[in-house]
Structures are given as C-alpha cells and as structure tokens.
Image (tube, grey):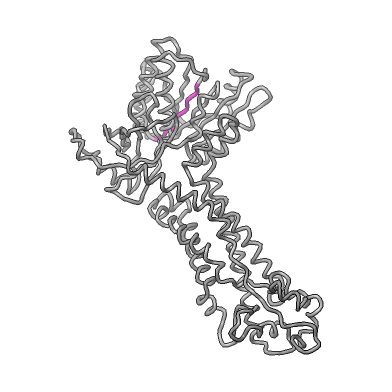
Amino acid sequence: MGNFAANEGLSIFVIHALSWARAPAACLNFNCMLILLPVCRNLLSFLRGTVQCCSRTAARQLDRNITFHKLVAYMIAFHTAVHIVAHLFNFEYFMDAQLQRNSSHLPFVLSEIGSGDNASFLNPIRTNETNPTIVMFTTVAGLTGVAITLALILIITSSMEVIRRSYFEVFWYTHHLFVVFFVGLVFHGFGRIVRGQTAGSLETNRPEACAEHFEDWGGPGSGCAVPAFAGNPPMTWKWVVGPMILYVCERLVRFYRAHQKVVITKVVMHPSKTLELQMKRKGFHMEVGQYVFIQCPSVSRLEWHPFTLTSAPEEDYFSAHIRIVGDWTEALYEACVGDKTQPQEAWKLPKLAIDGPFGTASEDVFRYEVVMLVGAGIGVTPFASILKSVWYKRIQQNQEVFTKKIYFYWLCPETEAFEWFADLLQSLEGQMTEKGVTDFLSYNIYLTRWKETEAAHFRVHHEAENDPITGLKQKTLYGKPNWDHEFSSIATAHPGTKVGVFLCGPPQLGKSLEKQCLSHSEADVKFIFNKENF
C-alpha cells in the first residue's frame, strides 16, 4: 500500500496492469515514429544515392524498406493489443475502487479525492453510478483509442497478400486511414487519464511515511495533507511530429511532380495483354532498373501504381510495360484505346501523372564484374532497361563497362509472354554476333508450363536453326532451372569475384535464390543477393 504515488500514482488501483499498459505504449511511440519513414520514397532515394558511394551493404538495406515497414506494423499491432487488454483490466480495477465504498480501504479513499470541483483526482472513474464502457466512449482517451483501433484493424486486414493482390483498391483506400490513426494517436494522451502526485503534494504527503495513515490525512497533527494529483502531459506528439513533417514534405514533392506535364508518345499493345507506354516529361532523368508511380486521373485521382521502367537512360523517352491483370490496369488499357488496331490521335490519349523515378537494387548492376539477372514473367521488366543500356554502352557506343559477364535467366509460364521481349533479345543477339562479343551475355529462357499441342509443335521444330518460340538461336529450355548447378558453374568460371544476383519475381523464388547465394559463397567467390521491392 505504500506505493500509491509510484507508477504515476495508479498502481494502488491496478497493481501490475498499469505497467502492462505503459510499456507497450512506450513501444508504440517508438514504432509509430518509424512506420512512416520507409514509405518516404524521395527521402529513401536521396539516402540511397548518398550511402551507396560509401557502403553497398547499407544501400541494400534501404531496398528492404517495405519489409521493414511491415515488421514495424506487426509490432504496432502487437503492442496495441497488449495495451488495450491491460487497460481493460485497469478500468475494471478503477470501477471496483468506486464500488467498494469503505473508508478503511485505501483505493476508495484515493477515489474520493477530488470529488468536488477541483481537478486533483486520481481515479479517472469519478462515480459509482457509471460503468467502464460509458467512460470509454465519453472520454478523449476512450474515443481516440476506439478510432485508432478500428483504423489499425482495417489497415492490417486489408494488407493481407490475398486482398492486396486481388483487390488492390481496397488495400489502397483503407491504407489512407493512417491519417485517422495518427490524428487519434496525437490526441490520445490529451485526456490525461494516467495521473500522478504533484511535486508540491509530495512535500506535504510523502507516500513512504503517509500511506499507512491514510485515514488521518488532512487531520490536525497527522503531518500528512490530502494528496493532490495531476495528469501527465501528452508525450506521443513529440515522437511522431518529426516523421509526420517529413511525410508531409514527401507528399508535397509528389503533388508537385503530379502536376508536371507528361506526354504519351507511343502506345503499343503486346501479346499476353501487356501494354507498353512510351512517355516524355521535361527534366526526367533515370538510371537502369528504376521505377515510377503512375496515376491516370480519368481512371482514378487517388490511385498510384508502381511500374518498372523498361527504357534505357540513353533513350530520349521513358517507358513502362503494364500487364493487364486488374480493374485499374483494365481501365487504363481501355483509356489508352489499346484494343484499337488503327492509329489514334495523341490528344485522345488520357493524361498521366508520374512520380519518380525511384531507386532499386537493380541500379547497382554495373557495380559487379559478374551479374546474374533472374526474371519471372512480367518481372523481366527491370532487366529490359539493363539489357538495353548494355546494348547502347557496349555495342553501339563501344563504351567500356565494369561488368564483364551477364547471365540472364527468364522464367515464363506461357509462350505469349515471350513475344514482347523477344525483339530486344533478337536485336542483342544479332548485334553481339556482328561485333564478336557473344561471350558477354549468356541468356537462358525457361518455359515452366506448356500445353500438349504446343509440346508437339516444339518437337517438330526443335531441330530448326532458330527457336520456335522466341526466334532466337538460343533454344528455350523447359521446366525450371537447376539452381544448384547454375551457381556451381558460375562459381567455377569466375573465381575470386563478387557475383551480383538480381531478382524480380515471386517471394518463393527469392528465398530459393538467397539460400543458393549463401550456400555457394566461399572464400574466393561471393554471391550477393538483391531483390526488387516495391
């Protein structure tokens, strides 16, 4: 009973539950400070360009910003749950202190302090004629807590992989409830429910001396005045105001970019429902492997979607290949009249807004002497930019690049997906043969699924000079690569080198390649794994 002023004065009511509420609250402050930083794309691009000159490892950590964002979100959800459960117990204890109307019971005596007009109370439940539920919905802390919790539940549940893949719009719109979350978070502590004994009161009522004589408080000769309590000032805003200002600046930069004029110079509809947009914007500069966010106001004024740039920095335009797989991409396809075969006037094409470009792991491709590029399906897009840049640098302009060897692997589940990219590979193949540098690029194309009718066609034309699927001299392989064999062969062919492994594909393939990088990295050969994350 001697610690009624300890732990902000409330531990006499709630025993250990206050600690279980306040410790997660402190962790929430810290995690809420971090949650916005990984999605400040312009800040990360600036940091990436700054640190990669000094540390390639640090730059790779910045590429995992979305993974870090998810981990912080999980911690916020966990600490929120603990915080809520602890406070449910706290309010039950507060209510019990009011119901047990016994002047020889210290919690009741403390609950009666401040019952008049003054605000020096300790128990936030001021009467026994109410219940914790009513208090929860009639206080600042209660209302903001409910708003924060509902917003967090909607944000997290709509972020599940199955919803994000199938109903991206649901994910996109509910994620903007973060505004409600942060506004509620800032005002959550303004109710000052957590209270402690004031500094002045500690001089006239020392807990270690007066706790045992609470029945005589304020009496003549007791030496113990009636204690006075006050609420703690809110602290959360001090943790989150900095990241919130950074994020507001981030949105202002995005707003400025969104109003820069973008001109669509060419629209190409490729097989396998892949739309290519070639665009120009004044002052636009890019590097290989970068990506942009695209908004089409005629489709949606709120939605921005990320797409890897497939053009090379040496070209006078920038392009993106967009696979038609959802409502937004389908609407964009129709707006760009991708289903029309005849040429369309430029003024009939929709207006676009572009945010970016932003850096990715693929930017570092020319920093390695030996490179493995692994793309799956439409995941080949960042490597289109890289291979085009190689074509300009090495073949057309005869520039020397640090990279001496590129191993390119493309895994596709359907034959149609090869068609839009085959032209680039055919051009590279022909130019390398003409220039006598065929050893610079080794490419392996794998068809992972096929129909019986297709298999019969492949068998008939297998002996042809060019591949029946891609038209390349390099024949298409069937099935999936034997990664253990591929990594062993590369390690044997390039002793004493660091091999950069770059993937744009599904997480399962990423885990497999990362394991291969670790298992085949030895004293003389290091495989460095890099994965696209956006």
Looking at the picture, how far across and down is residue 350, in whole percent? 25, 42
Q: Is residue 519 left or right of residue 381?
A: right
Q: Is residue 527 magenta?
A: no
Looking at the picture, how far across and down is residue 144, in whole percent? 51, 68
Looking at the picture, how far across and down is residue 171, in whole percent? 42, 54
Residue drawn at (46%, 32%), measured in percent from left and top? 375
Q: Of helix, strand and loop, which mostly describes the magenta segment?
A: strand
Relative to residue 463, is residue 329 depicted above or below?
A: below
* The quarter of the displayed image where residue 87 is located: bottom right
Residue drawn at (29%, 48%), measured in percent from left and top? 299
Depth check, front residue: 123 or 23: 123
Residue drawn at (62%, 81%), measured in percent from left and top? 95
* The quarter of the displayed image where residue 398 is located: top left
* The quarter of the displayed image where residue 26 is located: bottom right
Looking at the picture, how far across and down is residue 12, in whole percent? 72, 76
Residue drawn at (56%, 53%), measured in percent from left and top? 33
Depth check, front residue: 127 or 172: 127
Q: Is residue 412 magenta?
A: yes
Q: Is residue 16 left or right of residue 68?
A: right
Q: Is residue 340 left or right of residue 61?
A: left
Residue numbers of the magenta segment: 406-413
Depth check, front residue: 255 or 461: 255
Relative to residue 522, is residue 253 depicted above or below?
A: below
Image quadrant holding the N terminus, namely bottom right
